[in-house]
Amino acid sequence: MDLRIDHVRKEYPRGVLANDDISITVAAGEVYGLLGHNGAGKTTLVRQVAGAIRPTSGTIRIGDGDPVADPGFARRVCSVQPQAQVPLMGVTPRQAISLVARMRGASRAEAAGATQTLMEALDITEWADTPGERLSGGVRRLAAYGLAAVRPGRVVILDEPSNDVDPVRRRLLWQHVRALADAGAAVVLVTHNLTEVEGILDRLSVLAHGRVVVDGTVAELRAEAGPPVRLEIAVTPGREEPSPPPPFRSPPPRRERHRLVYRLDTGDSATAAEWAARLQAAGAISEFTLSPVRVEDIYLALEEEHDVVAS
Amino acid sequence: MSWLRSYALLVRWNALRLRFLLPLFALVSTGLSVGIIVGFAYLMPTVDTTSAAFLATGGPTLGLITVGLVMAPNMVAQSKLQGSFEFDQTLPVPPMASVAAGLTIWIVGALPSLVLSVLVAAFRFDLDLQVHGLLVPAALLVALTATALGYGMAHALPAAAVGLVAQLIVFVTLMFSPVNFPADRLPGWLQAIHVVLPFQYMAQVIRETLTPAAGGISVTPYAVLAAWCVVGLAATYRLMTRRG
């Protein structure tokens, strides 16, 4: 069941414009990434899909249903992991996840089985029977993911599901999110963890100040984003910034303290690797990496560009 | 999924979340009811039969009011601040099943204070309490009305203000409502206000089912309470399903 958002605009009282003419489609079987700065309007958008708030104008459709007109329909077809922690005071992950599975129609036995399988997939069985108030933030977040994923609706909305989660379990989480889509759900994933999720995303949008500033598949974004290879070097503290060979001078590198990121054409990779290896041997840089350009680089470039436009 | 199945699962969900706090709430409301029965008697040099009947039945009534109009709305406000209310709103269950499940838990939590404080009152004042068959329905109606109004209040007010207003309500019902004493001890204007408010009727239905009333059981209090109950439920439904 596809999710179609058409020209959605959400204006709060006092003229705060949270969403400004947003149109996106998430097909069944897709993981759709929703990226953007804090306050870009991502959470407002997904809460409208879940039927929790009403758009000022525009339409939202899930299959043939209208989650805005019929919040009961929205609750039946969407499973949601909200951005805020779900308090599990006194409730263990096993109890919470299996109860929600039963509310979504599973029999007692089905719910117990699905809960166990899910907790194993996320590697949290160790805390399956620990009450919520004694769980670490990361495990509580994974349990909240479990509430949305145990018997998923046709649309699954995950609002920053990986916050507080350790790196090993974040990988398990992303694998599970991918599997939800592969099983037929339309997954909307709000996240800031770009480098980790780019492998599981089918499409993505970047929102800025309530508007979609870019959308497409990861490959399309890469293709539009200019030189496809990135060279990152870490200048040794106290040493001068090296002067790159001519092909790397434009566009200028992005700087993060003593790290420089150059964008290159594929054909320049060998030259780049040689240059960086020489610098490292001479001690001018402490390390380097040569890799395909990351979604995060594209995103950061977009944000910079947008900030320039906005200011 | 059927309404009843949703309701049953939500009762379990709420009971799990409140299983540590609910016994505490029951204990505190029992302490309050018993405290009124024992403590208020100290304020009076002599406790005549009328005063004894009012204190003995007013204490249990205030226990029910405290659970419904103080503890329940405070927990609703807390669930809004902590995010569990937002999450519950995404569950595939009818909103009224969710309200009904919450009310059920609070009513169960309110009943121990009623039973215990009535027993203490009978012992303290050496009263000959006569339990009428309508006591259980009357107590359920009082608890339900108080909690429905508490829910309505919790959804109508900003979460941070709920605690304050709830305290004000319990203070007013304790000191300025004809719950623990007959209405004719109040000034006329306050009596007039209480004709509309539910508190004196809550006290009356409990009193009349515990102490033999001269005029039998009055019907008016049940009608007024039922009306307030409907107002509370309607406001709760309307406010909790409103969308920004």
Image: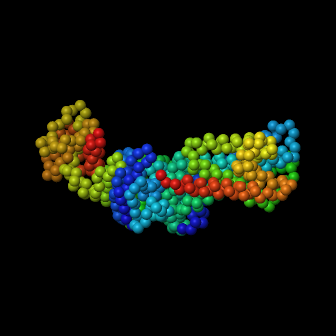
Q: Residue at x 13, y 42 (%)?
A: A245
> In which quadrant of the rendered view does residue B98 lie?
bottom right
Residue A292 image point, x, y percent? 23, 52
**Which quadrant would residue B28 be assigned to in this image?**
top right
In the depicted view, which residue is nearer to us: B201 or A256? B201
Give the number of marks: 0
A110 and A84: which is toward the camera:
A84
| Camera-nearest residue between B208 and A81 | B208
Q: How is the image coloured?
A: rainbow
Instruction: Give the vertical position of A22 relative to A237 (above or below).
Output: below
Q: Nearer the viewer, residue A282 or B38?
A: B38
Is A249 rendered above or below residue B118?
above
Residue A48 screen position, x and y as percent: 43, 56
Report the side of B92 relative to A228 (left or right): right
> Does the image show residue B131?
yes
Q: Quadrant of the N terminus of chain B?
A: bottom right
Q: Residue furthest top?
A: A238
Task: Tell me residue A125's x, y (percent).
Answer: 48, 57
Q: Does A179 appear above or below A311?
A: below
User: In the image, is A298 to the left or to the right of B19?
Assistant: left
> Is residue B16 in view?
no
Q: At 83% from the left edge and 38% from the top edge, which residue is drawn?
A: B44
Q: Does B28 sit left or right of A96 as displayed?
A: right
Residue A6 percent location from the top left of the image? 35, 59
Q: Name which residue lies at 16% across and 43% down.
A: A250
At 26% from the left and 37% from the top, the residue drawn is A258
Residue B130: quarter of image? bottom right
